[in-house]
Image (tube, helix red, strand yellow):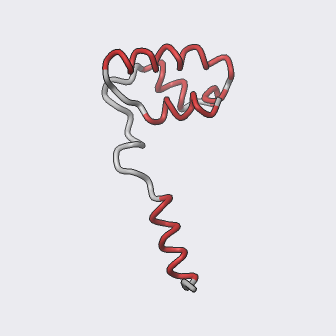
Amino acid sequence: MPSIATSNAKADELIAPVEGLDVPPSFRPEHITTLIESVNRYNPESLEVLEEYLAQQCSEGTFDCLADLAMLKL
């Protein structure tokens, strides 16, 4: 049976931030940055804006993890 220290180390590894995911992409529009950094991040009224941004990402072949996660949580 693994020790608690081994289990804790594994847990820390699994939840460690992935490099670059917390950094806003250079292509993220300012209104999206404002939206996902505010209390409106999980407001259902923000869904349409986030869907439009996702469509833009798909057409441009880009990826914005934080914006996409906010939309998924809605």
Considering depth in this image, is 19 or 72 the residue closer to the camera? 72
Measured along the vertical axis of the image, is residue 34 above or below residue 1?
above
Q: Residue 24 is drawn in which quadrant? A: top left
Considering depth in this image, is 14 or 38 the residue closer to the camera? 14
What is the residue that sits farthest to the right in this orientation? Answer: 44
Considering depth in this image, is 71 or 27 the residue closer to the camera? 71
- Residue 13 position within the rendered picture, expressed as x and y whole percent measured from the top left: 45, 65
The residue at the point 68 percent across, 21 percent down is 44
The residue at the point 48 percent across, 35 percent down is 66
Q: Residue 58 is drawn in which quadrant? A: top left
Q: Looking at the figure, which quarter contains the N terminus?
A: bottom right
The residue at the point 31 percent across, 23 percent down is 61
Considering depth in this image, is 8 or 23 the residue closer to the camera? 8
Q: Looking at the figure, which quarter contains the C terminus?
A: top right
Measured along the vertical axis of the image, is residue 14 above or below residue 62?
below
- Residue 40 position within the rendered picture, expressed as x and y whole percent measured from the top left: 63, 26
Image side of residue 20 versus residue 16, left or right: left
- Residue 49 position within the rendered picture, expressed as x and y whole percent measured from the top left: 54, 15
Q: How many numbered marks appear?
A: 0
The residue at the point 51 percent across, 25 percent down is 34
Image side of residue 46 versus residue 57, left or right: right
What is the residue that sits farthest to the front in this orientation? Answer: 1
